[in-house]
Amino acid sequence: MSTVLVIPEKDEGTQPLFVAEQALRSRRVDAVVIVDGWSTDETYERLQRSLPELLRRFPDASIRLLRSELRETGKGGAMVTGLKHALSNGFQNVMFLDGDISSVTPHWIPFLLQSREEHGAAMARGYFDRSTLDAQITRHVTRPLMAIYFPEGHKIQQPLGGELALTTELARFLLEKSPTAPPHHWGIDTFLTVNTVAAGFSVVEVYLAQKTHKKKSLTELRAMLVECFDEMCKQIAFHGRFERVPEPERELVTVLPAEEGLERVGEDVRTQRYVDLDEQTERFFTFVRGLRSPNRRLKELGLPREERGWIASLFKREAFEERSRELTAERWVPLLDRLARGYIERRFSPIYHDVVFACWTLRALAFALHEARDFESAEAATERQVEFALRYGTRYRSESASPSPVRCG
């Protein structure tokens, strides 16, 4: 079965060529397409200059450099361009690897492809060990909202990961038959994951040891947080899950157990604490001092006065460290749900992005300060939060709800 690897990137220099080389060394990839999302530096030109050397070392491989078909877009635009290229050129498998990964090995490719084939899944996804302070959007937004509104996919541990393999049947469905067009920004991973499970396609998640790439502080994650939250809310609305959530009819997700002994490239991420919490806390209070009408925005999103007052108390530096202990999963999940439902009712207006970002930052800081003591405790706390969200979401489920269209995967 012919396989094409798509590497979306923007402003990554020649790092995508390293990712391409590791994949080609696996001997399981027939073609590589690097899709530049209209880099703002000299990345595209550097890739053009360096590509002939990679072609010389892999003379039998097809390696192409494209630009995203739409300008002023991000990761989503590059991935959509890659999907369209794969379908128009008759490939049977499409793979994605992010262009900034430094820990990729040739073993990732057969792990993903073989696991998908052996389990008869439409999609294989990678999951990894991660730093206690990493994946704060996954931990506190995407996974809890999936557990509430798309419980058929709640077992997926890393729904925002960009390392995946899918059949062209699924690729065509995602491009042509999903309820919404794919976004051209950071929300693309949410779009792919949600629409795959909501349509009844099966997924297998494969352990790939660890993923090292560019790390971002909470402040630097604002655009990603907003786009992922926005896309998840749109998927909830357009799939009709805002009103009723159907009971899952069958298990769609298989998570393969983590294996010891896999090659772990680079410093062990389980011991990294790359975010300076003191600095991030001070940045947060600088940000909230500049918020415009936060109480009014939270009221418009449906938060009752008592809860608004409690959040306002956390916006005060002198009370934050002690009172943030109260922002547990049991308090965060209902708050996140109210934010999401209010945002949907307010037609996804961007005037609420700042208060959503502020509330998420509160939860991320509280998690880091009080729950994520080490790798094991952070992962256990993440799973407890998902399980609480799954139970909380039963209030929206109905056995008589009309199920989403089911397809075999």
Image (tube, rainbow, N blue to C red):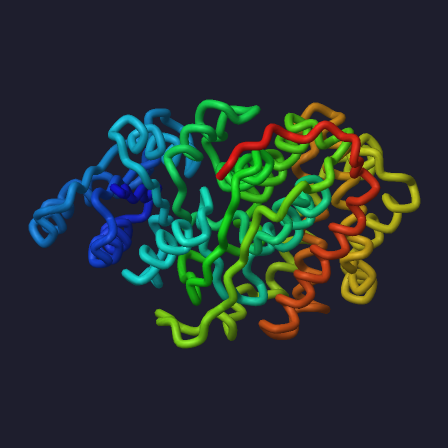
From what the image shows, is residue 70 above or below residue 91? Answer: above
Q: Nearer the viewer, residue 3 or 98?
A: 3
Q: How many marks?
A: 0
Quarter holding the N terminus is top left
Q: Is residue 397 left or right of residue 371?
A: right
Residue placed furthest toward the right? 306
Q: Nearer the viewer, residue 274 or 318?
A: 274
From what the image shows, is residue 407 above or below residue 272? Answer: above
Name the spot of residue 403 as percent of width and height, x first.
68, 31
Is residue 10 in sight in this rendering? no
From what the image shows, is residue 372 above or below residue 308? Answer: below
**Quarter of the image where one finds residue 224:** top right
Name the spot of residue 4 as percent of width and height, x first.
27, 41
Q: Nearer the viewer, residue 3 or 334?
A: 3
Q: Residue at x 77, y 65 (%)?
A: 321
Q: Residue at x 57, y 37 (%)?
A: 200
Q: Nearer the viewer, residue 409 or 50?
A: 409
Q: Residue at x 72, y 27 (%)?
A: 402
From what the image shows, is residue 249 above or below residue 332? Answer: above
Name the spot of residue 241 as percent of width and height, x first.
71, 32
Is residue 62 in sight in this rendering? yes
Name the spot of residue 143 as percent of width and height, x first.
64, 50
